[in-house]
Amino acid sequence: MSVQAPSAATKILLDEQEMPTRWYNILADLPFPPSPPLHPATRQPIGPADLAPLFPMELIKQEVSTDRFIDIPQPVQDIYRLWRPTPLLRARRLEQALNTTARIYYKYEGVSPAGSHKPNTAVAQAFYNKAEGTKRLSTETGAGQWGSALAFAAKVFELECMIYMVRISYEQKPYRKSMMHVWGADVVPSPSPLTAAGRQIREQDPDSPGSLGIAISEAVEDAASREDTKYSLGSVLNHVLLHQTIIGEEAMLQMERAGAMPDLVVGCVGGGSNFSGLALPFVRERLKSGRKTRFLAVEPDASPSITKGKYTYDFGDSVGMTPLVKMHTLGHTFVPASIHAGGLRYHGMAPLVSGLVDHGIIEAVAYPQKTVFEAAVQFARAEGTIPAPESAHAVRAVIDEAVRAREAGESPTILFNLSGHGLLDLGAYDAYFAGKLEDVPLSDERIQELVGAL
């Protein structure tokens, strides 16, 4: 007796020569003026000189550039080609499991050396720092995807690397720390005793699980106190989102090749980098052609900056060392609950994403972590790939949208970013199967307390 196997995924590949050689800059096409960052002391718009202690000048130029496309330097392209172009796959087995009329595609960024999308900007930032004489980089990391990506990029360009890893993730995800050590980086749990910011938080709360805001304060202080060191950020800022648009530029070519341009583009959001990397090139097409593409940003209900936060100026870090940027925020003193999606435990959102939400171009939804892991397991059992807890938020939304389409008799094309694999997050899956995961939604009372203080 023969057994008919379910259809496999359709994989749409690009040749190495087809990898995009330019990043897309949405600042050239925004239908509204961006709000300028403000100096933390004067509250006046900042200039390049204010950012020079932290970033190399080329990245500062990219932060404010209005050029529609920016060429990717050849040395960066050469490193990208270790894993790019990344595959686009149609999730046929998931479609069948859901009995949906939707067509589901995903861009898979977990094939990079660090297992996520983060090297797309880490390599670029390390290159520009090396070119301007930087010797050492400091940064923060949540779940460790960004820290491992920068450790890899720093080793490629022979830079020292100091990483402040959010304490709860340092404890939950030890093998991310191991990856950073393999590539030669120094890693400490944050809050740490190495900085004034870290010591202040530890005095206030000796058992603090840490947060991205706290770790950013430590990394910024580290960079500002040393002549040989610059700061690298893995999300939020314009130049970071710029570097990630290689994802969407590739995906557009692949979707055109598949003859299936998306009706809905989905991604998880913490600071906004992987979602923006996929979505912004498609936002450009919506702005140009009027195409009715929907864009859905998915966040944890333990840190719902878009869906429950306030759109206002706030610090990017906990102590108040960074410039103030206009964004959706829960307040820079907010320390999120210790959910396993450590890369999404941030109090704010990228200003570009926040502005597009405010103008009705991007929608947002928030989910509790148990239903997110339920979706991750369903996806893994259908498609084989185990998603990172962060990416699983996008999977949850895609499944819900696909079921909604089936019930409505609609056949949308859905594209989402599977921004990283979960092979170093299996402890979180063990906790899920053991029934030890808890949903920790942020209460309305606590939200009002947080945003009321802004």
Image (tube, rainbow, N blue to C red):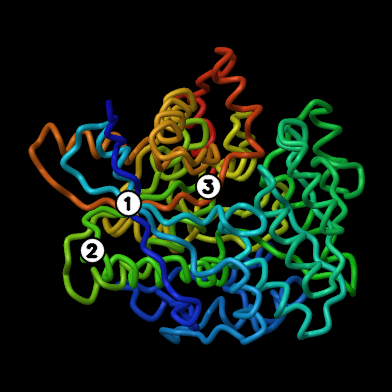
Q: Name the residue under label 1.
A: 90
Numbered label attached to residue 261: 2
Q: Which of 420 and 273 is in front in this view?
A: 420
Residue 448 in view here: no
The mark nearer the N terminus, 3 or 2, is 2
Tag 1: amino acid: Arg
Q: Which of marks 1 and 3 is in front?
A: 1
Q: Residue at x 44, y 80 (%)?
A: 18
Numbered label attached to residue 268: none
Where is 245 relative to 101, above or below? below
The mark nearer the N terminus, 1 or 3, is 1
Residue situated furthest top in the rendering:
435
Task: Tell me if 163 is positioned left or right of 87 in this view.
Answer: right
Residue 27 in the image: state x and y as whole percent.
42, 76
Q: Residue at x 88, y 41 (%)?
A: 199
Residue situated furthest left in the rendering:
409
The mark nearer the N terminus, 1 or 2, is 1
Task: Tell me if 342 is positioned left or right of 394 in this view.
Answer: right
Tag 3: amino acid: Gly
Residue 305 in the image: state x and y as whole percent.
47, 43
Where is 190 relative to 265, above or below? above
Gap in Å between the C-alphas at discs 3 and 2? 26 Å
Task: Tell me if 381 is positioned left or right of 333 in this view.
Answer: left
Describe the element under mark 2 as helix, strand or loop. Answer: loop
Where is 26 relative to 138, above or below? below
Residue 452 in the image: state x and y as whole percent.
49, 37
Q: Which of marks 1 and 2 is in front?
A: 1
Q: Residue at x 77, y 71 (%)?
A: 156
Tag 2: amino acid: Met
Q: Name the residue under label 3.
A: 270
Gap in Å between the C-alphas at discs 1 and 2? 12 Å
